[in-house]
Image (cartoon, helix red, strand yellow):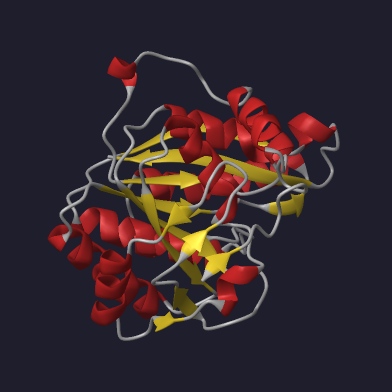
Amino acid sequence: MIRRPAVAGGFYDASPDGLKREVSGLIVEGGEKDKEKVVGIISPHAGFSYSGPVAGAVYSRIQMPMTFVIIGPNHTGYGERASVMTSGEWEMPNGNVPINLELAKDILARSRFMKEDENAHLREHSIEVQIPFIQYFTDDFDIVPIALMSIDYKICEDIGKAISEAVKESKDSVVIVASTDMTHYEPQTTAEDKDKMAIEYLLKLDPMGLYNIVRDKKITMCGLCPTVAMLIASKELGAKEGLLVRYMTSGEVSGDYDQVVGYAGVLIK
């Protein structure tokens, strides 16, 4: 099937030229020698006027692989709790993006909990908003889109290991993307304090520590499960360190510091 854009014209410009200009203004220009080879990344998914500077900073730093496994939270509640699209294309203003059928099917086969499902993806924005940043740098790539609702740690572990095992067998270069925003709608100082605690576990590559601190401290990080699964997969693939590229909040854009959303961009190497 062709999956149509859900948030074009809302979260980002719907016209090809307008979107290119919009993303260009969010990219950090630098030489190719400064690009880093990464196993995974963490990138936010709000409207580009809010979280775009963080996402742009992350994608500006990495070497582009052939395939992106993009794991996002399921905000809509539609579809399966852990769902993957295994075939078709994602239509975007700057061109359709194919799904890597072989890798998607392999991940699905290795997981006890993941289901093949399109409904979870049709109106969900968290994966879609990553694609324009990738398309700014390359048009030669495919994706594996995975959407997760709130799930137990053991399910995150199952999915993370399924991804890592499939990636090890893949003939293509792969980067795993965890799409997440951080604390939602709390005062700036509170959001920064809570997000700092979560980021410490991110940088230590401690998925269980991250899962527990977010639950214990009631940190409203919407992409917790995608991030935990990404960290588990990345460690299985040999990742050794995390690097914070940029952190900011919506207050820096809106001027409203009473109810902010936090955005963090992290490289997993």
Front residue of this view, candidates 26 and 122 = 122
Tell me how many marks there are: 0
| Image coords of residue 58 (percent x, y) | 47, 34
Give the vertical position of 157 relative to 137 (above or below).
below
Q: Is residue 245 visible?
A: no
Give the vertical position of 112 relative to 244 (above or below).
below
Quadrant position of residue 218: bottom right
| Image coords of residue 156 (percent x, y) | 38, 72
Q: Is residue 55 visible?
A: yes
Give the side of residue 81 with respect to residue 257, left or right: left
Image point (40%, 56%), residue name: 143
Quadrant position of residue 17: top right
Give the side of residue 60 with respect to residue 171, left or right: right
Give the side of residue 146 with respect to residue 257, left or right: left
Image point (78%, 45%), residue name: 187
Image point (57%, 69%), residue name: 121
Front residue of this view, candidates 256 and 99 = 99
